[in-house]
Image: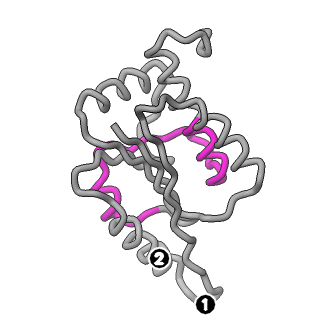
Amino acid sequence: MHIRLLAVGDRQPSWVDEAFGIYTGRFPREWKFRLDTIATVRRNKNEKSQTAMAAEGELILAKLVATEQVVLLDEKGKELTSRTLAARLADWQSDSRDLCFIIGGPDGVPDAIRQRADFIWSLSKLTLPHGMARVLLAEQLYRAWSLQAGHPYHRA
């Protein structure tokens, strides 16, 4: 199974890239993980953010593969414990379709992305900067894998 993150926002602070790289570097090779980024659509002060969000949504939809399982990261999604995520990840892996996580732009995603998503997941009820969401996603995926593998990383 291939796992990828499709994220709006191509420039992140160096600490985000470093932390993200630490966790994704620990992923099992069979995941063939990759990060695909989409540049944030420019927002003018006179332009409504809905226009930019719609343009980003079109770019996201264009990059999705019809057979992929899509997990949208959104603050209004369902919260999971690490153990529940590990079980859900096992289900996604047994489905044998590739898996794509989506982090939208600064204004979120249009309804078309929500409708395309197979699951909407909230990392937290807190609003997170997109870079922090990337790092948290990578860490939680690594933790879920460590729970499945019986690796001592998760000690709870």
Pick out the residue farthest to the bottom: 46
Mark 1 highlights which residue?
46
Q: Quadrant of the N terminus?
A: top left
Residue 48 covered by magenta stretch: no
Residue 50 image label: 2
Real-space Cα separation, disc 2 to disc 1, in angstroms = 12 Å
Within 10 Å of the Cα at label 2, are there few (<14), some (14-19), or many (20+) other Cα atoms?
A: some
Q: SS at mark 1?
A: loop
Within 10 Å of the Cα at label 1, are there few (<14), some (14-19), or many (20+) other Cα atoms?
A: few
User: Which span is picked out in magenta?
Assistant: 109-138
In front here: 43 or 37?
Answer: 37
Give the color scheme: rainbow, by chain, secondary structure or one colour. one colour
Image location of residue 21, percent across then percent down: 65, 42
Identify which residue is drawn at 77% across, 48% down: 15
Residue 82 image label: none
Q: Give residue 22's quadrant in the image.
A: top right
Identify which residue is drawn at 46% across, 33% down: 79
Pick out the residue farthest to the front: 29
Residue 118 relative to residue 76: left or right: left
Q: SS at mark 2?
A: helix
Image location of residue 127, percent across then percent down: 62, 49
What's the amino acid at mark 1? Asn
